[in-house]
Each structure stands twice: as C-alpha cells, then as structure tokens.
Amino acid sequence: MGKKDQVPSSASGGKKAKKKWSAKKVKDKANNMVVLDKPTYERLFKEVPTYKFISQSVLVDRMRMNGSLARVAIRELEAQGVIKRLVHTRGQLIYTRATGDEKKTAGVESDDE
C-alpha cells in the first residue's frame, strides 16, 4: 500500500489554537446613587425644569440616579407644577418643562370647575 491509499487521520491537518472564551466585552457597572444628597436635590429642581424632554431614562443618564429614584423625583416635580406630562404609557412617562402660559391656563381651568 502506498501513501495515497491510507485514510488521513484527524491529526494530520494543521493545528488550530484553542478558542478562548474569556475574550468577551464586559459592560461597566453603573454606580448610580440610590439616595438623593443635598447638592443633587438642589440640582434636580434647578436644572430638570429647563429640559425640553424629561423621562426616567433622561434623569438616570444625566443625574446619575437609579430608576426608582428618578420616578420619585419626576412625581415630585409634577406635583410642584414645574413639569407637565405629555405621555403616560405603561412603560414610560414622558414630560416636558412647564412654561408660564401653561401654568396660567391650568389655573384658569381649575377655577372654572
């Protein structure tokens, strides 16, 4: 029998490097605050009413707070009348800044009722 008649074994091919599974990208852990401190509380009431688009996600990104704290902050801002609700869906609340004209019309509507 010649070399051509032999069945090639699996070891006869080129050697491959073993696949490494640890080469995945790792997302950095967000270090968002869970409790509002005094400077962030003041910054919240100073800056957020000037935003055109206000949502839970925006507060999480810009103010570095967690989602539940952002929801509480949005409720507080709405109760004080400094922001106005645009859309209320199951998953997301979307607000905008309350301008002076909207505050006046809101006061007129509440007087008529």
Image (spheres, grey):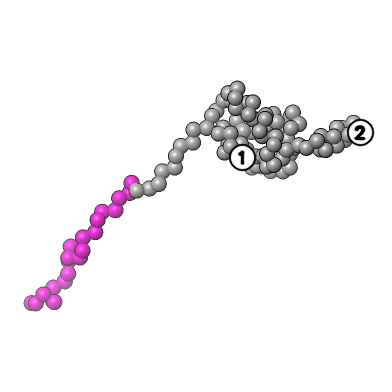
**CB atoms of marks 1 and 2 within 8 Å:** no
Q: Position of residue 56 (x, y in %)?
A: 62, 38
Provide the residue designation for mark 1: 58
- Which residue is at the far left? 1
The quarter of the displayed image where residue 49 is located = top right
Provide the residue designation for mark 2: 112
* Residue situated in front as seen by the camera: 79 or 7: 79
Q: Position of residue 42 (x, y in %)?
A: 64, 26
Quadrant location of the C terminus in the rendered image = top right
* Residue situated in front as seen by the camera: 53 or 2: 53
In terms of sequence position, does the residue under pointer 1 or pointer 2 come before the other?
1
Element marked by disc 2? helix
Residue 3 among those drawn in magenta: yes
The quarter of the displayed image where residue 71 is located = top right
* Residue situated in front as seen by the camera: 63 or 13: 63
Judge from the rendering whether residue 17 lies leftward or rightward of residue 110; answer left or right.
Answer: left
Residue density around tag 1, few if under 14, some if 14–19, many if 20 or more, within 10 Å: some
User: Residue shown at 69%/36% (left/top)?
Assistant: 50
Residue density around tag 2, few if under 14, some if 14–19, many if 20 or more, within 10 Å: few
User: Residue shown at 60%/27% (left/top)?
Assistant: 40
Element marked by disc 1? helix
- Viewer can see residue 68: no
Q: Position of residue 89 (x, y in %)?
A: 69, 43
User: Residue shown at 41%/43% (left/top)?
Assistant: 26
Quadrant location of the N terminus in the rendered image = bottom left
Q: Amino acid at mark 2?
A: Asp
Judge from the rendering whether residue 14 lies leftward or rightward of residue 56; answer left or right.
Answer: left
The stretch of residues the image draws in magenta is: 1-22
